[in-house]
Image (tube, grey):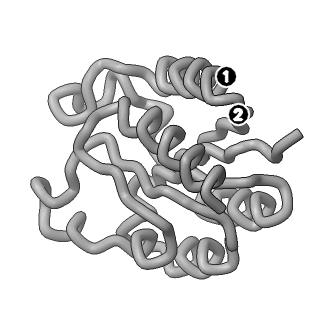
Amino acid sequence: MTKPIYVLNGPNLNLLGTREPEIYGNTTLADIEESCRKEALALGLTIVFRQTNHEGELVDWVQEARHSASGLILNAGAYTHTSVALHDALKSFNQPAVEVHISNPYRREPFRHTSYVSPAVTGVICGLGAQGYVLALGALCRLLKNA
């Protein structure tokens, strides 16, 4: 069986559905997980879906994925704009990886325009709401089939 896709979520994403719904919508992280599980099943994939508010734990999971995952989807939240440690961990991940953002960071505050994640991943999906996760799964499925 193929290794799973890791879907990793950073700080404050556990508050989706209640935190700034004008930016992030009303979809909860549990809703996103359910959508990802359904899409993964339809694509013949499995997923490991996790969320943490702790940078070191997120780095640990990326390192774990090096040996346990066939691909990676990452919404690093605020760590996108601050974490060199996360960037370095991603550089050691030699499988396809997609950075996902529910909102479009380029339409927001200037400090959100810089991503330490983007240079270390295969592609970026942003500004398409929660469906960005499902789109990322489809993209990874195609990338893995073509590898």
Residue 6 against residue 120 in the figure, above or below:
above
Q: Which residue is mark 2?
A: 45
At numbered mark 2, what does the secondary structure look like: helix, strand or loop?
loop
Amino acid carrying label 1: it is Leu
Rendered residue at 53%/76% (across/down)? 87
Amino acid carrying label 2: it is Leu
Residue 136 against residue 38 in the figure, above or below:
below
Residue 143 in the figure: left or right of residue 147: left
| Residues at circles 2 and 1 in contact by the CB criterion of under 8 Å | yes
Tell me the distance, in whole angstroms, between the alpha carbons under discs 2 and 1. Answer: 6 Å
Rendered residue at 70%/29% (across/down)? 44
Q: Which residue is mark 1?
A: 41
Given residues 28 and 147, the one toward you in this image is 147
Provide residue 33's location: percent of width, then percent of height. Answer: 56, 25
Provide residue 17's location: percent of width, then percent of height. Answer: 35, 21
The quarter in which the C terminus is drawn is bottom right
Residue 137 in the figure: left or right of residue 41: left
- Residue neighbourhood size for the residue with mark 2, other residues' Cα within 10 Å, grouped as few (<14), some (14–19), many (≥20): some
Rendered residue at 33%/22% (across/down)? 18
Q: Quadrant of residue 96?
A: bottom right
Provide residue 91's location: percent of width, then percent of height. Answer: 61, 79
At numbered mark 1, what does the secondary structure look like: helix, strand or loop?
helix
Rendered residue at 81%/47% (across/down)? 3
